[in-house]
Image (cartoon, rainbow, N blue to C red):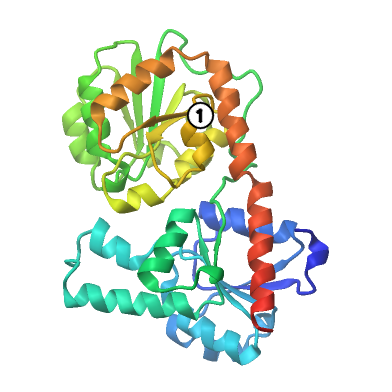
Amino acid sequence: MTNDAFDAKRVVWWGRSDVSYSRNGVIRSAMQKLGFSVYDFKPRCAFTGHLEAKVTSGCNADFVWVPCFRQRDVVSASKWAKKKNIPLIFDPLISAYDKQVFERNKFAPTSKAADRLLRWESKLFQLADVLIADTWLHAQYFQEKFNVRSENIFVIPVGAEEQLFKPIANKETGDQSKYHVLFYGNFLELHGVDTICEAILQNTNPAIEWTLVGDGPMKAGAIKKCGSLPNVHFVGWEDCPYESLPTYIHNANLVLGIFGTGDKASRVIPNKVYQAIACGRPVLTMRSEAYPKELLASSTSGFHWVEQGNASAIVKAVELAIGCEQLQDNAAAFGTYKTYFSKVKVEEALGQALASAAGSLSK
C-alpha cells in the first residue's frame, strides 16, 4: 500500500490513551510512514467528546481512530464520525467482556452482568466501520462472539518498536558458562506464571539461570515458590525501565512467552514475543493457532513450542534449546520477525484497513 493510494491524509486519534504504549506507538509510526498526520484529541469526558469536538478544529480530519483499551470513547467518536461522514476505526486489542468475565473472573459467564457487558461491547464493536484485531483468532472471536461482519475486521500484527527492539551485531549473551532464560511481564494469570514457577522447580540443570522481570498480582507467589533458589533472579520494573528491556533480551539465550490455560491466552501473541524476536532472540512459548501455521510446523523458526500449562514440557524444551546453535537460533528468530511481524507488515495491513474504511462510506 503506497501513500498515493490515499487522498485523505489526516487522522484524529480519539481518546485519552497512552500513546507510548507499544501497540499505539507502532500504529502511529505506521500511519506517519503512510503519509498521514495524526491529531491527538483527548476529550475531558469520554461520553461527551463529540460535543467538545465541535469547538476543536483539529478534529476536522479524514478518519477517526479509537486506540486500544478505549471502549468508553467509541460512542462519542462514532457520533462525531457520522456527523462528519468520515469512517471510524477501532483497535480494541482486547475485549472488556473477555477480560472481566474470563480473565479476572469478575462476573460469572451466565450472570446478567456478563450478558449486559457482552451486549454493550457488541454494540461498540458494530459501530466501527473497521474493527482491528491483532491475530486472526481474535478476528474470528470478534466475529462469532460480537456479531461483527467479517469484512469489517482487519488483522494488524502488534509488531515491535524497531528503533528500540533490534538485533545488535555480534552481541553475545551474558555469562557464557550459563544458559540464561528470561521472562518479563506483569505477572498475570494469562502468562502462566504458576507453570513457569513449576518448571523452575522441576529443573535440575544448575547451568540454567532464570531471570523474571516485572511486577504484578502473581509475583509475590512466584517469589515465595522460587525466590530462594540461587539460579533464580527477580527484577522489579523500578530496576528495569522500559528502555532497558532490550539489554535484558540481548543478555538472554531464550525468552519465555506465555503458557496460560485460558481461551484468551490461545488467541494472543504478547508484546514480549514480538520484542524478543525483533531483537533476534529465540522464544519458548505455548503452541497456538494465533501464529502462522508455517511457524508451528517449522523447527527452524526461532520458536520453541510447548502445550499450554505444561511445566515438564517447558523444562524439556529449554534443554532442547540449549542444544541448538545459538547464533542460528538468533538469526532464525529475527528472520521470522521480518517475514511476518515487521513494521513493513504492519504498514501493509494498516494501509489495507484504512483503504477499506475510506471505501466503506461509499457503499
**Where, quadrant-wise, is the C terminus in this rendering?**
bottom right
For the question of whether residue 44 can be seen, the reply is no
Q: Position of residue 127 (x, y in %)?
A: 49, 80
Instruction: Say whether residue 218 is left or right of residue 38.
Output: left
Residue drawn at the location 63% of the way across and 65% of the way down: 353
**Where, quadrant-wise, is the N terminus in this rendering?**
bottom right
For the question of whether residue 26 can be seen, the reply is yes
Residue drawn at the location 29% of the way across and 10% of the way down: 206
Find residue 9 and report its image quarter: bottom right
Q: Position of residue 194 (x, y in %)?
A: 22, 37
Q: Amino acid at mark 1?
A: Ser
Q: Position of residue 354 (x, y in %)?
A: 66, 68
Q: Is residue 289 above or below residue 10?
A: above
Q: Is residue 1 above or below residue 249?
A: below
Residue drawn at the location 17% of the way across and 30% of the way down: 225
Instruction: Say whether residue 305 is left or right of residue 333.
Output: left
Q: Is residue 114 above or below residue 81?
A: above
Q: Residues within 10 Å of mark 1 (few under 14, many from 20)?
A: few
Residue drawn at the location 55% of the way across and 30% of the way down: 333
Q: Position of residue 271 (x, y in %)?
A: 47, 45
Instruction: Say whether residue 101 is left or right of residue 293.
Output: left
For the residue pair 305 and 106, the one nearer the viewer reads as 305
For the residue pair 356 and 235, the one nearer the viewer reads as 356
Q: Is residue 161 above or below residue 8?
A: above
Q: Residue furthest right?
A: 4
For the residue pair 185 and 363, the one nearer the viewer reads as 363
Where is mark 1, residue-wise? 298
Q: How many marks?
A: 1
